[in-house]
Amino acid sequence: MALQRLTRTRYQLIKQLTRTKQYFLKNLTYKCNTLAREMRDESTSLFSATVISLMTDDYTLDELAELPLEAFCDLLQEKGRGRFKEPEKIAKAIQRAITMSYRLGTLHKSLSMLS
């Protein structure tokens, strides 16, 4: 009986984690639709704490796109606690994704408040 409950709990946790990741990806697509494609070749995941922090913290996409590359690399290293081997490559990919993504106009502000 205990094994059955543990198995059921594990199944429910995995199901909830999957649902939460899909929800985050959907909202991320509304905010920056090309980020998943640009980050595909990079060494970090879309679900890394650094990427989630960049997309949900106080920075807007426009602020991230306008940051000089050196400052953006420093921000990535600060958020990632110095674990990135090539922060320039990741910063360029994120900035490229931001500049290539479409904007939602007036809905953009309300979506930023949701995420």
Image (tube, grey):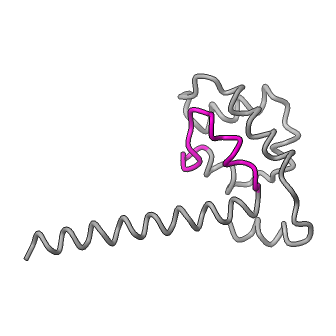
Q: Nearer the viewer, residue 71 or 23?
A: 23
Q: Which residues, given as a range, are shown in magenta?
A: 32-50
- Image coords of residue 110 (percent x, y): 80, 72
| Residue at 58% over, 28% down | 84
37 w.r.t. 111: above or below: above
- Which quadrant, please, contains the C terminus? bottom right
| Residue at 66% over, 40% down | 39
**Left or right: 86 with respect to 30?**
left
Residue at the right extreme of this rendering? 105
Q: Quadrant of residue 85?
A: top right
**Left or right: 39 with respect to 31?**
left
- Image coords of residue 51 (percent x, y): 63, 46
| 34 part of magenta stretch | yes
**Left or right: 53 with respect to 12?**
right
| 6 part of magenta stretch | no
Q: Main secondary structure of the magenta part?
A: loop
- Image coords of residue 78 (percent x, y): 62, 34
Residue at the left extreme of this rendering? 1
22 w.r.t. 87: above or below: below
| Residue at 85% over, 72% down | 107
| Residue at 76% over, 55% down | 32
